[in-house]
Image: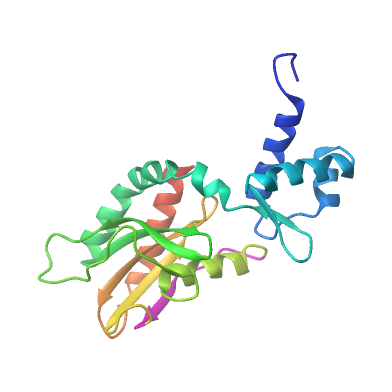
Amino acid sequence: MTAETSQTLDRGLRVLKLLADTDHGLTVTELSNKLGVNRTVVYRLLATLEQHALVRRDLGGRARVGLGVLRLGRQVHPLVREAALPALRSLAEDIGATAHLTLVDGSDALAVAVVEPTWTDYHVAYRAGFRHPLDRGAAGRAILSARQTAENGHPGYTLTHGELEAGASGAAAPLVGVSGVEGSVGVVMLADAVPERVGPRVLDAAREVADALR
């Protein structure tokens, strides 16, 4: 720490980084141990960050990243979208279905990038900005699956049918190993079931996007 920097600000930023790297939140004691400071300092840091909605604490007292971070990060979406587009275009053309990148936005899944195939006679209209609950649709369910398997392995792909649109099926795989970004890559198609080869292809696309974002 040099004379030109702020120790308090540095600690506050370290708190945000620590919280961004965990899906389960951290207690005051855990943060105190990781930062090497006493609990009183951590309480003050959390109280200040809470005032700006950058941190929230659940009923159990665990601190998590707050929704205020989304406002600061809105300009990140264009950068993430740009990095993901090559893999999404390849996926859409290969499968012949609408491909999308979906990120977590609060308790919702938010489509931030969508690519439609150029050679099909028809495909599902799916627009950037479309949002839905995390527990409905392949994109959100893939993200929830990644949360559940974070401690004991790599999640696979998720298949759904008719959850967001009648007659439409979806396949999605979560982004893995991208710090600060929680999302999934998937396709949606007008079909009673997702063809067998689509799941593994979506999984490959999610890995491509994750690599581009690292």
Question: Residue 90 colored magenta?
Answer: no
Instruction: Say if residue 42 shows up in the picture.
Output: yes
Q: Is residue 112 above or below residue 108?
A: above
- Identify which residue is drawn at 70% across, 20% down: 5
What percent of the width, then of the height, locates residue 177? 55, 51
* Front position in the image: 173 or 47: 47
Q: Residue at x 79, y 60 (%)?
A: 61
Residue 175 at x, y percent in the picture: 48, 56
Q: Is residue 161 magenta?
A: yes
Query: Viewed as shown, does residue 167 lie left or right of 4?
Result: left
Judge by depth and name the residue closer to the eye, 207 or 168.
168
Q: Position of residue 176 (x, y in %)?
A: 52, 55
Predominant secondary structure, magenta span: loop
Return the x and y of residue 124 as percentages of the image width and height: 22, 71
Q: Quadrant of residue 145?
A: bottom right
Residue at image point 11% right, 63% down = 119
Quadrant of residue 12 within the rendered picture: top right
| Image colouring | rainbow
Q: In the drawing, does residue 176 fall left or right of residue 172?
A: right
Residue in view at x 32 percent, y 52 percent: 87
In the image, residue 171 above or below residue 183? below
Which range is magenta?
152-162
Counting the numbered discs, the total is 0
Q: Against 14, is 84 above or below?
A: below
Q: Residue furthest top?
A: 3
Quadrant of the image containing the N terminus:
top right
Residue 180 appears in view: no
